[in-house]
């Protein structure tokens, strides 16, 4: 960067060139690598958000409903048992609705595993009662399960806890995996900046020596270099993050947002959904250029001070 | 230890690079404040190494060096810059920064010390005029001749009116007339209190001056005059 002003009286232009020649800095390579890392970090953050929200939605759906299973037995008619179970459920505090699934609906759930519904009609398939519960004020499932099993032979309560636990565990593992990837990207970025700082000093060794001889302190020299790294970090962070956001945006608009509940719809809602969702998404994405800039600034400064500190 | 008027004191100083032989051996030297001396000796005698010790580019392998009242051997790294700001150096190979203009190169010590261009502009332009480089203020070093680079390097070394000026072959690339003019500049600085050490092979220059001569021979320092 060169600033220039001309005093007409003396006709001498006063230039203020950067003391560290920008053209000799290994910034282009650093910027390319950092941009790729920021892009990957943005993808990782987006994936983390998608996973977290999906797991939240699934567990919320599951925990809002329990199922009562009534197995056929010889001692009573199935319809009587179902009616009895329904009346117990309706009388239970915390149950908001009770829906006895007809036999065909139950068979349809088994179809993918056991084949067509005709055969299922001949088998002693249990009947299901879908029970919606008030999540804020849920019933005591232990007491309810005991009451059902004691009152109705062959009745059992499935709270879906096992699935919920599995889902939560899977979601948690994926989140930790994402955080691990982000940590690795951060460590690589720091290593890259340190390497680039060393290269910057190597390339400009003569400049550094002269600056030392004219009385520049290590901090002064570090300042000459760190601002160039800061600018490179900010540019890389912005480009990488915008590219990451563009990827999710393209993914979101790549299929119909109204008809699909898959990755595309989730990506769409991540960026163009309700304000409370998009605000937190953008806030997290914004962290990428901010952290990249800070990493470039701090890692470069510390690396340079350490290297210069080892001189005489 | 150094006396009250002493700006630099070396006692039994030795210097070796890595595991090589000692390039300086048992050097004892006392530079009085405001003095001016020449340093001479055959090539490879250790002149540049001695200057490197004096402009704080190296620490001695043994012996004591005291500069401006500070013991260099025990001085922490962060205390070196203020001392270096008191020293002006003219390098044999000029060490001008090619990406800065002549004006910026000359003004570099002032810029590093935190002064703003408006504060030093007039002084630098005047100094450039003195060394005959007014027309080259906006030029970059690669377009200058050896002599012009030499003059720019000298201007950079003296622009802060340092307490100690170390010059390695400062007149090696200029014609005799300009060499005399530069010597006059050094003497003027010396009159204002700057201690000066000029390393040179130029016996004519040494003979014309009346200053004492330090002679380095195979790493050992002797005195003439």
Image (cartoon, coloured by chain):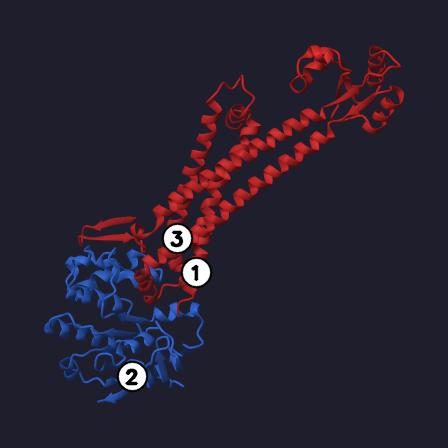
Chain colours: A red, B blue
Q: What is the quadrant of residue A152 in the picture?
A: top right
In the picture shown, does residue B162 fall above or below B45?
Answer: above
Tell me the subunit letter for badge 1. Answer: A
Task: Name the one closer to the observer, A259 or A109.
Answer: A109
Question: Can the viewer see residue B158?
Answer: yes
Q: Residues within 10 Å of mark 2 (few under 14, many from 20)?
A: many
Residue A83 x, y percent position in the rendering? 83, 12
Discs 2 and 3 share one subunit: no
Task: Name the one closer to the observer, A223 or B196.
Answer: A223
Label 3 and label 1: CA atoms lie apart by 14 Å
Tell me the subunit letter for badge 2. Answer: B
User: Along the polypeptide, which appears first: circle 3 or circle 1?
Assistant: 3
Residue B14 x, y percent position in the rendering? 36, 82
Label 1 sits on residue: A305
Label 3 sits on residue: A196
Mark nearer the viewer, 1 or 2: 2
Label 2 sits on residue: B219
Element assignment for label 3: helix
Discs 3 and 1 share one subunit: yes
Name which residue lies at 64% across and 30% down. A56
């Amino acid at each position: 960067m060169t600033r220039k002003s001309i005093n007409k009286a003396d006709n001498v232009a006063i230039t203020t060139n950067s003391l560290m020649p920008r053209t000799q800095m290994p910034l282009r390579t650093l910027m390319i690598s950092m941009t790729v890392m920021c892009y990957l970090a943005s993808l990782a953050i987006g994936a983390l958000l998608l996973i977290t929200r999906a797991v939240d939605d699934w567990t919320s759906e599951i925990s809002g409903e329990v199922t009562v299973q009534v197995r056929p037995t010889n001692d009573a008619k199935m319809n009587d048992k179902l009616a009895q179970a329904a009346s117990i459920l309706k009388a239970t505090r915390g149950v908001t609705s009770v829906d006895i699934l007809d036999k065909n609906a139950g068979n349809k759930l088994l179809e993918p595993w056991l084949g067509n519904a005709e055969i299922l009609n001949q088998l002693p398939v249990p009947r299901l009662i879908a029970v919606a519960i008030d999540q804020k004020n849920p019933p005591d499932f232990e007491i309810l399960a005991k009451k059902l099993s004691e009152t109705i032979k062959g009745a059992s309560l499935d709270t879906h806890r096992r699935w919920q636990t599995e889902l939560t565990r899977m979601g948690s593992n994926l989140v930790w995996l994402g955080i691990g990837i982000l940590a690795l990207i951060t460590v690589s970025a720091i290593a890259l900046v340190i390497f680039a700082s060393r290269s910057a000093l190597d390339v400009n060794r003569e400049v550094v020596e002269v600056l030392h001889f004219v009385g520049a302190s290590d901090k002064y020299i570090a300042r000459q270099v760190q601002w160039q790294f800061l600018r490179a970090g900010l540019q890389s962070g912005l480009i990488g993050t915008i590219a990451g956001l563009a990827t999710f945006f393209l993914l979101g608009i790549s299929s119909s947002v109204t008809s699909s509940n898959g990755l595309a719809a989730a990506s769409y809602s991540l960026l163009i959904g309700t304000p409370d969702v998009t605000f937190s998404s953008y806030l997290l994405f914004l962290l990428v250029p901010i952290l990249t800039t800070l990493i470039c600034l701090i890692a470069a400064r510390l690396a340079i001070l350490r290297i210069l500190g080892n001189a005489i | 230890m150094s006396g009250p008027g002493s700006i630099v004191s070396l006692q039994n100083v030795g210097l070796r690079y890595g595991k090589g032989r000692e390039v300086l051996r048992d050097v004892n030297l006392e530079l009085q404040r405001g003095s001016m001396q020449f340093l001479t000796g055959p090539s490879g005698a250790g002149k540049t190494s001695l200057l490197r010790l004096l402009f704080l580019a190296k620490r001695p392998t043994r012996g004591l060096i005291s500069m401006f009242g500070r013991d260099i051997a025990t001085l922490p790294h962060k205390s070196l810059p203020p001392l270096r700001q008191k020293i002006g150096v003219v390098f044999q190979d000029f060490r001008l920064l090619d990406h800065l203009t002549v004006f910026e190169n000359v003004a570099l010590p002032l810029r590093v010390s935190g002064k703003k261009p408006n504060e030093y502009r007039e002084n630098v332009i005047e100094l450039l005029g003195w060394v005959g480089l007014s027309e080259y203020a906006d030029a970059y070093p690669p377009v200058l001749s050896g002599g012009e680079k030499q003059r720019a390097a000298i201007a950079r070394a003296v622009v802060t009116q340092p307490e100690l000026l170390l010059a390695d072959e400062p007149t090696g690339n200029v014609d005799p007339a300009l060499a005399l003019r530069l010597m006059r500049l050094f003497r003027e600085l010396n009159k204002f209190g700057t201690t000066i050490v000029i390393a040179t092979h130029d016996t004519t220059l040494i003979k014309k001056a009346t200053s004492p001569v330090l002679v380095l021979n195979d790493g050992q320092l002797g005195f003439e005059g």
